[in-house]
Image: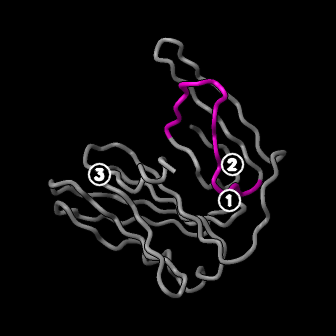
Amino acid sequence: LQYVVKDDYEDVAILRKTLENGQYEYYLVSDQMDTFMCEVNFTVFDLKGKEILKNNVSQLIRGNESEKICDTCLKKELTDDNIVVQFEWKNSNGEKKVRTFSQLPTEYKKAQSSDIEVEIGNIDPISKTGVVYVRNKEYVRNFWLYSLKGGVKFNDNFLDLVPGIHEF
């Protein structure tokens, strides 16, 4: 839960609003006082990982404000489909941010543990960091990464993953 809340309260965040008809609107929300240009890239995938739509918008952020974005994510032909919308942008400090939202109006095939492979690599004992690679063959809803060893922290968790290779 703290991972999702952290994403909601980033200084520059993408948030989703659920409409009465079950569709969604997406907003770029800034708590920064500075004015800056924010480039937002978004990609819509089906649950097999096939790219359906890719686009970007440049949004001038004038301090503390929110702006509706991604009207094309609400295209009529996508409203009844199971899709995943992935946003990428940089905050006011130039740090890359990624946020993923799933739209699941119909039943979908649930991934089995046999559809997921996890591998640890790039371990640096000095900085005490490493990379966890997750390969999934099917769409995974709310992927939960954990360690039986105490003190291990992950940069992200509870993510919806389209088929592919993901790094944590």
- Mark before the other along the chain sequence, 3 or 2: 3
Disc number lying in front (3 or 2): 3
* Residues at circles 1 and 2 in contact by the CB criterion of under 8 Å: yes
Task: Pick whichever, 98 or 15, lies toward us.
Answer: 15
Residue at left 55%, top 86%? Answer: 76
Disc number lying in front (1 or 3): 3
Q: Residue 96: horizontal and vertical position, in percent? A: 39, 45
Q: In which quarter of the image is residue 142?
A: bottom right
Distance of label 1 from label 3 (alpha carbons): 29 Å
Q: Is mark 1 on a helix, strand or loop?
A: loop
Report which residue position mark 3 lands on.
Answer: 11
Q: Residue 4: horizontal and vertical position, in percent? A: 48, 53
Task: Pick whichever, 17 or 98, lies toward us.
Answer: 17
Label 3 neighbour load within 10 Å: few <14, some 14-19, many 20+: some
Q: What's drawn in magenta, residue-wise?
A: 138-155
Q: Residue 69: horizontal and vertical position, in percent? A: 37, 71
Report which residue position mark 2 lands on.
Answer: 164
Residue at left 52%, top 81%? Answer: 23
Does the magenta run of residues contain 149? yes
Instruction: Report the label total.
Output: 3
Does the magenta run of residues contain 33? no
Report which residue position mark 1 lands on.
Answer: 49
Tell whether 38 sits left or right of 148: left
Looking at numbered disc 3 in the image, what kind of residue is underneath it? Asp
Q: Residue 98: horizontal and vertical position, in percent? A: 46, 51
Looking at numbered disc 1 in the image, what kind of residue is underneath it? Gly
* Scheme by which the image is coloured: one colour
